[in-house]
Amino acid sequence: RRRGWGPIKFPQDRAVEDVLLHSPTSDAWKIASPTNSDAEPAPKIEQATRCNWRVFRRNCSEIVAVFVIFFATFCCFPGVVSTWSNNEIPYAQFQVFLIGSFQVCDLVGRWLGSRSPPACSTLVLKLTLARGLIAVPIAMVLTNFYVVFMVVFALSNGFLSSLAFMCCSDAEASSSDKERKGFLMNLALVLGLSLGSIVGELLTAVAQRGAGV
């Protein structure tokens, strides 16, 4: 050690300093690096939002159809259906029969939909909207023919949901677009289930008040 000059640095010491300074774990590298975790993620979020919006506009018919199918179904089932009763059958057994009928007929409808040729997404959307606009008011005022309604309601649910998901299969789309489309389809399904259940609770309360329960 020389007086007044500090420690002597040998070439190997400088090499070690260069390695430490340019190491991804060093503080100096983190501050100077453009890939710092504190960088603004806004451009990536904006780009992802634009890509999702582009995919949604291209496939809006089938995505909205999935939402409408499950929204309309859960507006009626099982909330409003739980207010139905039959004078000849005990309430509990009648409810089990209705729920079982829905499960079986929904499965049959899905099988029929998978066997049918692919339909136009616009046609599927029109059918789902017509189903929702017709089925929900009928379920609220229905006083008889519960089983017939449940069979038609469940068959249409399974059939149209299968057609809607079949419309989403696009072999020409890129892998990234397919992933975004799958995300949007699942989002529409979850939103339909959630919002339909909330509205179904309100409709159930109205139906119970009208039936004097």
Image (cartoon, grey):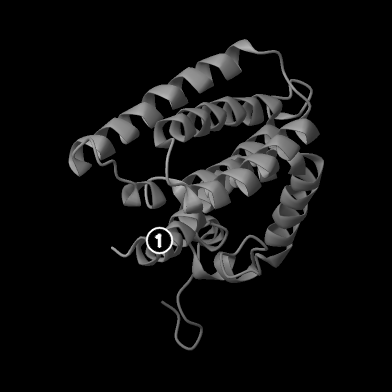
- Find residue 117 and report its image quarter: top right
Q: Residue at x 73, y 61 (%)?
A: 46
Could you tell me residue 5's position as x and y percent? 51, 83
Residue 171 lies, in percent from the top left, at 74, 20
What is the quadrant of residue 14 in the picture? bottom right
User: Which residue occupies 68% across, 30% down?
Assistant: 168
- Side (left or right) of 93 relative to 158: left
Residue at figure coordinates x 60%, y 10% from the top left: 115
Question: Picture coordinates of residue 114 (x, y %)?
Answer: 58, 16
> Is residue 71 visible to us here?
yes
Q: Which residue is mark 1?
A: 201
Q: Nearer the viewer, residue 169 or 158?
A: 158
- Residue located farthest toward the top when viewing the structure as drawn: 115
In the rendered structure, which amino acid carries the disc numbered 1?
A: Glu
Residue 59 x/y as whole percent: 76, 39
Q: Is residue 63 left or right of residue 86?
A: right
- In percent of the image, x 48 and y 61: which residue is there? 199
How many residues crowd around disc 1 within 10 Å: few (fewer than 14), some, or many (20 or more)? some
Q: Is residue 194 above or below residue 109?
A: below
For the residue pair 186 and 149, the one nearer the viewer reads as: 149
159 sits left or right of 144 in the view? right
Quadrant into which the N terminus falls = bottom left
Q: Name the quadrant of the C terminus.
A: bottom left
